[in-house]
Image (tube, helix red, strand yellow):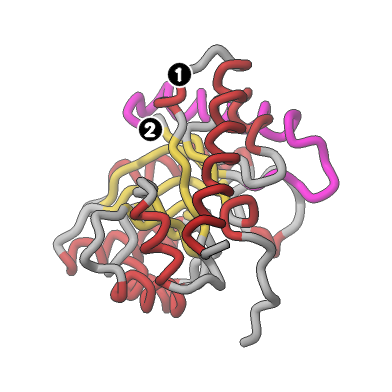
Amino acid sequence: MTRKAEIGERLGEVEAQIAQACRAAERGRDEVTLVAITKTYPADDVRILAGLGVRDVGENRDQEAAEKARACADLALTWHFVGQLQTNKVRSVVGYADVIHSVDRGRLVTAISKEAVRAGREVACLVQVALDDDPERGGARLADVPGLADEIAGADGLRLGGVMAVAPLGGEPGRAFGRLAEVAGLVRARHPEATMVSAGMSGDLSEAIAHGATHVRIGTALLGRRKPFVR
């Protein structure tokens, strides 16, 4: 089987799962965007996905993402940065990312705004919400989310997209995504335009869609089990 055929088969399976989850939740398929997470996979795979109709691509490491975005600059893609972001990487990330999912502190808002203005770009930012107590996974505390959302909404060069979260390891995804849905509702009450809810990956996309996810971040189910990342 060629790589294109393999990815096409996997994409069909993922699309069927998303469609089924949408039906179960009484939602339209057009309410959910598939973001293909291509970390550790080559630009050739991005091109295959684009040829199969995928328009949203996500990465979590700047060096890899920047190279891939340059290699695929001729494609009409929306690039999502989904990993933890350090301030020293902001200038590079703002150069290619249309959406940053992992904004979890005010210092980052200031840095992204500065670079977006410098680059003459508007960048959509999501507040990453911490649904557990693991600091290595990032995310703002629930009590800090409304204030952080206000900061993004008021920052030059930025657009408040909504919220993002990762389900806690070993926890019940549905319960976690239910909490995220409540937080998303609070943010929307203050900022009606902040409609994005980025939640759900290969193993829990159905639960995420059931609780209102508008963007699901799918990697393994699309491209296969990843090789270990070597720094």
Spot the residue most to the top: 26
Q: Quadrant of the C terminus?
A: bottom right
What residue sits 57% from the left and 30% below the top? 183
What residue sits 53% from the left and 40% below the top? 12
**Pointer 2 or 1: first along the chain:** 1
Q: Which mark is residue 28?
A: 1
Q: Quadrant of the N terminus?
A: bottom right
| Vertical arrangement, residue 34 with respect to residue 76, above or below | above
Question: Is 60 colored magenta in this rendering?
Answer: no
Q: Classify mark 2: helix, strand or loop.
A: loop
Closest to the observer, 100 or 187: 100
Closest to the observer, 121 or 20: 20
Closest to the observer, 34 or 129: 34
Question: Dot 1, how many residues are within 10 Å of its Cα: few (below 14), some (14-19), or many (20+)?
Answer: few
| Vertical arrangement, residue 16 with respect to residue 228, above or below | above
Identity, as a three-letter code, of the amino acid under mark 2: Ala
Q: What is the C-alpha distance between the residues marked 2 and 1?
A: 19 Å
Q: Which mark is residue 194?
A: 2
In the picture, measured across the screen, residue 92 lies left or right of residue 213, that is left
Question: Is 182 colored magenta in this rendering?
Answer: yes
Circle 2/circle 1 CB separation < 8 Å: no
- The answer to which quarter of the image holds residue 210 is top right
Residue range corresponding to the magenta coloring: 166-193
The number of numbered discs placed on residues in the rendered structure image is 2
What residue sits 69% from the left and 39% below the top? 204
